[in-house]
Image (cartoon, helix red, strand yellow):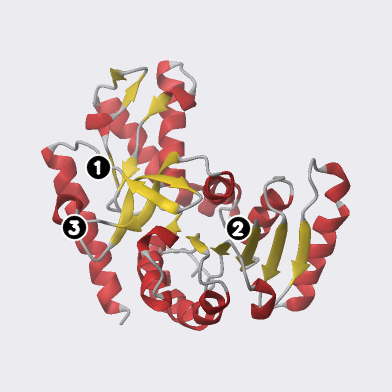
């Protein structure tokens, strides 16, 4: 399994560490603008390979070194504006960045799966599809995977049950219009009642990223682990169901936009898109997310 990771900011470095110690990546190519710094990261990661179960070949490279990649993980991003309140502020510069980065990478690895980590992830997944011409099965983004994980953690604390035993998704935009799909949330087959307290937990989960950003200036560990989980699902063909950003397939009449829905991820990439039974309000929320993301997509043309 060959993975090329583009962009070595805080998230990219954390993801590189996770992949270098994962034992499911055979070759890891690191790419960034500062080649000297990239080589420093490569050397540091190489020095720790004695301590991992299955060593990974790690190199600093350029476009040509990425040829034949199974996965392209995109963490490259324009700088985050100070005091950023909305991820959509990054859209124009990051779409322009994709226009320069993706064509050579896609041409050298036409069968690769793209895992988009950069924000605004829903907009960038859409443009990755458009720029590369890849199939919808090949392109996905981290979407609301971390948001859902935060929500499940808070719910687990409330009802005193392991978070893995909770099925509760935050869906739609990875941003202000996301919503909790409480109508299909359950634990052990028992529905989780949509109480005001649980909607308050959703609000807490949805703002958690900006809380981390306020306190330390960036987020990196949770999103890197989420991206690594998607990559592992592809590498190991696990077929786990994850709430990730994908090209919506007509669900609730939504097309030509990318949002988070539960998707089965395996060696083929996005192998299935699942259609949860949402109540009327949640359906409206999903369509509202689609409208907001589509406006930003159109504004970046």
Q: Which residue is mark 3?
A: 254
Of callouts 2 and 1, the N-terminal one: 2
Label 2 element class: helix
Residue 14 is situated, as x and y percent measured from the top left of the image, at: 66, 54
CA–CA distance in space, label 2 to label 3: 31 Å
Label 3 element class: loop
Quadrant in which residue 206 is drawn? top left
How many marks can you see? Answer: 3
Q: Residue at x 44, y 61 (%)?
A: 138
Q: Residue at x 41, y 52 (%)?
A: 270
- Front one among 235 and 156: 235
The answer to whether residue 85 is visible is no
Q: Residue at x 38, y 70 (%)?
A: 129
190 sits left or right of 73 in the view: left
Question: Label 1: few (<14), some or many (≥20) within 10 Å?
Answer: few
Question: Label 2: few (<14), some or many (≥20) within 10 Å?
Answer: many
Locate the N terminus by quadrant: bottom right
What number is the disc on residue 11?
2
Residue 155 is situated, as x and y percent measured from the top left of the image, at: 40, 26
- Front one among 88 and 101: 101
The answer to whether residue 109 is visible is yes
Locate the C terminus by quadrant: bottom left
**Is residue 106 depicted above or below 227 in this figure?**
below
Q: Which residue is mark 1?
A: 275
**Is residue 145 depicted above or below 56 in this figure?**
above
Of callouts 2 and 3, the N-terminal one: 2
CA–CA distance in space, label 2 to label 1: 30 Å
Are the two marked residues, 3 and 1, in contact with CB atoms closer than 8 angstroms? no
Quick one: which residue is furthest to the left in this view?
280
């Amino acid at each position: 399994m060959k993975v090329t990771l583009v962009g070595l900011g805080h998230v990219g470095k954390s993801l590189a560490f996770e992949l270098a110690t994962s034992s499911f990546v055979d070759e890891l190519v690191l790419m960034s603008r500062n080649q000297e710094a990239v080589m420093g990261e490569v050397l540091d990661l190489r020095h720790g390979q004695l301590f991992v179960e299955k060593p990974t070949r790690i190199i600093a490279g350029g476009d040509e070194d990425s040829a034949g990649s199974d996965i392209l993980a995109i963490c490259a991003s324009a700088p985050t504006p100070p005091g950023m309140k909305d991820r959509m502020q990054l859209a124009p510069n990051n779409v322009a960045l994709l226009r320069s980065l993706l064509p050579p990478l896609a041409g050298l690895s036409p069968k690769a799966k793209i895992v988009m980590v950069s924000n605004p992830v829903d907009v960038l997944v859409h443009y990755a599809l458009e720029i590369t011409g890849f199939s919808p099965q090949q392109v996905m983004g981290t979407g609301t995977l971390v948001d859902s994980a935060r929500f499940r953690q808070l719910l687990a604390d409330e009802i005193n049950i392991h978070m893995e035993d909770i099925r509760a998704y935050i869906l739609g935009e990875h941003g202000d219009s996301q919503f909790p799909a409480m109508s299909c949330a359950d634990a052990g087959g028992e529905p989780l009642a949509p109480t005001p307290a649980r909607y308050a937990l959703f609000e807490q989960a949805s703002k958690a990223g900006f809380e981390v950003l306020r306190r330390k200036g960036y987020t990196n560990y949770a999103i890197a682990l989420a991206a690594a989980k998607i990559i592992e699902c592809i590498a190991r063909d696990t077929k786990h169901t994850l709430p990730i950003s994908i090209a919506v397939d007509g669900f609730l009449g939504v097309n030509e936009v990318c949002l988070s829905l539960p998707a089965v991820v395996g060696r083929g990439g996005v192998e299935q898109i699942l259609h949860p039974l949402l109540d009327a309000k949640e359906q409206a929320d999903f369509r509202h997310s689609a409208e907001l993301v589509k406006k930003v997509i159109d504004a970046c043309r």
